[in-house]
Amino acid sequence: MRHCLSVAIGYLCLGIAAAQVPVGPPLPIILHHADSFSWRQSDSGAVRELTGNVWLQQGNAVLRCGSAVQYLETGSLLLRHNVRIEHGDLRIAAPLVSYEPQSGIAIADRGADIEHKHRTIRARWAAYNIPQQELQFATSVQYADDTLRLWTDSLRYLRRTDRAYAWGGVYIESPPYRLVGEADRLLYAPDAGVLVLVGHALLRQHDETQPTSIWLSADSIVLADIHGAHSLQATGSVVLLRDTLWAASAERLLWEHSSSQLWLSESPHLWYGPAELTGDSAYAVLHSGQLRTLIFFGQARLRMGTPFPERSHQLRGDSLVVQHPSDSLIELIAYGNARSLYCHRAASGMPEGLFRHSADRIELLFIGDSLHQARWLGGVYGEYIPENLVRERFSAWSLPGMAWQRQRPSLPPWRHRTRWLP
């Protein structure tokens, strides 16, 4: 998964580098129209002042404004009053623009609105490098297209590829995919269908079928093919939450939305109702955001809570399968070196000893936290430990490897959203 993330970032950065093409000799500035013009001397030398419906052009870049000042020694232009720059399908509107014909760079330091194809960008400061067709934005930047809206402090936009790179804290919304999120940095390549969030990345997806949300936080998150049945990859301190229904943590995650399949690797840990599971890796199938099938591989272990906090039902094996056929039933199957511990309770609900078993395969069916049905297959061994031997010594009878300490993760707070939205 780290390879996939590196490829995605490298691919986008390659596109940014490729967009910087050599610039030839500057083209002359052509004055098409001005209602009036005059000449005067200034501290910077001779200047020409143009007033009223000013229309200038350099190459295929058209500049219009209410008035302009041209410094004849350098050729620099100061455009004022309803400035509009047209470059092909790109439109820039600003109150004030300084333009350098030698480099082809226009700077709007009092804010600008940009339109390109089906996207708009607004910021308090903007610069456009016309030869390289690259725009830079700073301070209160807002970007919007058909799929994504974002707010950030700084943004770089490449007109040739429609790609954007944002930093300084980013908050995003994607109404078509019911997504909101934030990160320290962002790479967005709509042509490739890739969105990369880097640094304290956080995503929330609202479930359209239920009033719940799925939350994902990680060091970095990659959404691929965001225009179709997308996949999602996350690396580094990954936490996945379905409100209060279930939660998971791992170092790596891969989620194929088209098939509703989920893979967790490197110390995966999962909380599911009263159950808590861990192992070397995990695979899950979801339906409408609900975990329907869950498989843990490699030293798989499960604990299920009871009304007595110091005690838990336990199951371990080379692999564990958890199935949730209905809201009240949980089916557990352990394969290979399977061992189980069941906390028995009397009709009064009080503890009444423990049942421990080992077998090649163990199948348990729970209703809530009560065992409804059990099967032990192959090399079965079982024992009952009466309550007078257990008492306060439950840990002495616990299965090996069940003493891990891990707190269920909670919803992370927003770090950047409140900077731009109420």
Image (cartoon, helix red, strand yellow):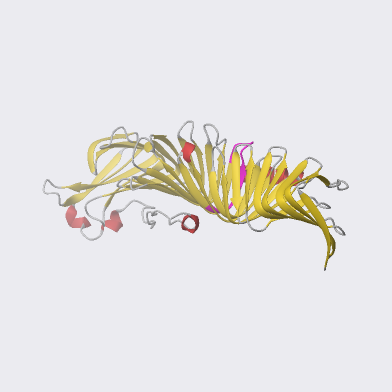
Q: What percent of the width, then of the height, locates residue 247?
A: 39, 47
Q: What percent of the width, then of the height, locates residue 133?
A: 74, 45
Q: Main secondary structure of the magenta part?
A: strand
Q: State yes or no: residue 26 in magenta.
A: no
Q: Residue furthest bottom?
A: 43
Q: What percent of the width, then of the height, locates residue 405?
A: 38, 58
Residue at the spot 21% in from the left edge and 52% down from the top edge: 307
Question: Dividing the picture into quarters, in which one does residue 117 lie?
Answer: top right
Question: Dividing the picture into quarters, in which one does residue 138 lie?
Answer: bottom right
Q: State yes or no: residue 186 in magenta.
A: yes
Stretch of the chain drawn in magenta: 183-194
Residue at the spot 65% in from the left edge and 48% down from the top edge: 93
Residue 140 in sight from this viewpoint = yes
Depth order, front residue of 38/156: 38
Eyeballing the image, is 42 above or below 260?
A: below
- Give the quarter of the figure containing the N terminus: top right
Q: Is residue 162 left or right of residue 226?
A: right
